[in-house]
Image: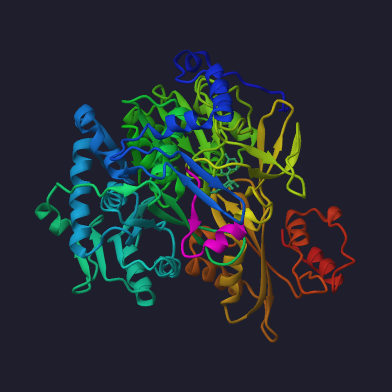
Amino acid sequence: MTEQTRIPQPASAVARAGMTLDQYQAACEQARRDPETYWRGVGERLDWIKPFTRIKDVSFDRADFRIRWFEDGVLNAAANCLDRHQAERGEQVAVIWEGDDPDQSRTLTYRELHAETCRMANALKDMGAGRGDRVTIYLPMIPEAAVAMLACARIGAIHSVVFAGFSPDSLAGRIEDCGSRFLITADEGRRGGKRIPLKANVDAALEKAPVDKVLLVRCTGADVPLAEGRDIVWNDIRERLSDDCPPEPMGAEDPLFILYTSGSTGKPKGVLHTTGGYLAWASWTHERVFDYRPGEIYWCTADVGWVTGHSYIVYGPLANGATTLMFEGVPNWPDHSRFWRVIDKHQVRIFYTAPTAIRALMREGEAPVKAASRASLRLLGTVGEPINPEAWLWYWRVVGDERCPVVDTWWQTETGGVLISPICGATPMKPGSATRPLPGVFPAIVDEAGKPKEGPAEGPLCLVDSWPGQMRTVWGDHQRFLDTYFSTFPGKYFTGDGARRDADGDYWITGRIDDVLNVSGHRLGTAEIESALVGHPAVAEAAVVGYPHDIKGQGVWCYVTLKQGETPSDELKKALVNEVRNEISPIAAPDVIQWAPGLPKTRSGKIMRRILRKIAEGEFGSLGDTSTLADPAVVDDLIRNRPG
Ligand code: WTA
């Protein structure tokens, strides 16, 4: 596979393309020359209660920093996802729910989804929630998760969805950080035939971070304790609630949601997205990247606990009147054909998943794929981490039978929606490359001084200008927002990713260049894992790095220094793995724990992660200069005792 391996868009995709290559180039040109007109078009996709007259007001300079889009417009996100479709497609299916159990599925039409959302919005109002209040959502992948998000949006409350795989401690931290007084959860979740004790987790979390009211959705029917005066069972009150709830008029720049994500330092930060710009960008990108047409069945396999679920299960598709599939289960249960059988069962046209899932399924060979016809498919997408060319080609050849374009979409929680990706039916594809920026997106690969490099280049990836879906602040800590994203290269948004641009102008994302790990497409901060490890009484110090992992993309490698008098043992390793699982989530569980009598540090005491990464990668030849270390001998010891 060389960089020149270009795969043209299949003829069928070109023939139907909503945006041709010429139109894509014209749109890029217009966004450059006449941004007002271009962005007005993006904003006008939405239904505005009061139309905007101002379009963009942005400065990335520290002195007068601001990011505002469509600022004087007034709208409601839930009304855009529901009300405006009622006349045209009230009876069309909005949400197809496919249960963990292959015999369970459910559908909700746009009319039903509207009614359910209004009912839950009224429930929230009765609980005392309103405009600007934060509501934490800790739900499994059931339609009520989408209903809960839309219900918050309808009354102007700010939702904070916490992935249901997070531990009670992580949940408590997120409730506390945004001062949420309301929580929506379920008795239990289901995944791969197992039950997840959500309400028990909630009860544990609320001991640390109490809330006023809990709305409990019955999912498995498990018998869970209810706290008098605090817990309300949705299923008991649902019938009595009115299915009418007028949408709250919101300013374009009013917050829509907070979503916590990991950074290089400290605790996860609350990424804040606002109403107008976010929704316009989610909607526009969903239509353009996937070339979506009303009536098509669209499936994104993400969880609503991540940004991909927010933008491409809920907001983007529903704003576009799509039929969006929500899947409660996992790719390998009851067997490795599950994804492909679901595609046949629901006649899925567009399928959007993560490279880690593709790599795991690829390992099982072609037979499980061939067990399903996949004839309904017309487009494949990936997101969340770099996709290696082998996995890309397998996806294209085996899953898509070389007739479905593959769109490798690069973006982040912070960007709200896709920024770099092929456009279905237009952009020539290259296995492993996210190809080109969408019109109006201006990436730069910069040198150390932050100066954009020209032509083919490699280095830190920045964006030199704003787009409507950009995050606006870190909840409760605007300074952290500026410090994290706008101070490494002043005047530019720094993504934390490295990238390469080839001679054709195509982008290849090389991965994070900060202390953020990407494990199976999940973002984890090394600092969070270190803090969990140090929480164990036997641990004096810990340093965590990522290393290449065949399936997960990156694995978690932990160097652990024990306190005086503590003895390394397999039991202790297990205890440390459990510590991380319980403090954060099983998704953060260490893959390797290496006992480290000492860690390589500079004379000023800074841990040299670069060296630790090299050792974890097994690349001892390229350790670089170790002479500046306080004690160079620790490096030899770590190499000698490297596990595996
Ligand atoms: C990585 C997920 C390569 C990247 C939407 C980014 C990717 C981080 C791709 C954001 C891709 C996402 N190719 N890398 N197509 N998509 N990433 O916030 O490192 O969970 O910075 O958002 O995932 O992860 P997040």
| Residue located at (73% from left, 47% from top) | 450
Q: Relative to residue 40, is residue 239 depicted above or below?
A: below
Q: Is residue 323 left or right of residue 234?
A: right
What is the quadrant of residue 533 in the picture? bottom right
What is the quadrant of residue 174 in the picture? bottom left
| Residue located at (23% from left, 29% from top) | 89
| Residue located at (54% from left, 60% from top) | 588
The region drawn magenta spans 469-484
- Counting from the top left corner in percent of width and height, residue 398 is at 53, 27
- Counting from the top left corner in percent of width and height, residue 14 is at 50, 15
Q: Residue furthest right?
A: 627
Q: Residue furthest left?
A: 240
Q: Relative to residue 425, is residue 261 depicted above or below?
A: below
- Counting from the top left corner in percent of width and height, residue 117 is at 23, 47
Do we see residue 142 in this rendering?
no
Q: Is residue 447 left or right of residue 531?
A: right
Instruction: Answer whether residue 483 is magenta in the image.
Output: yes
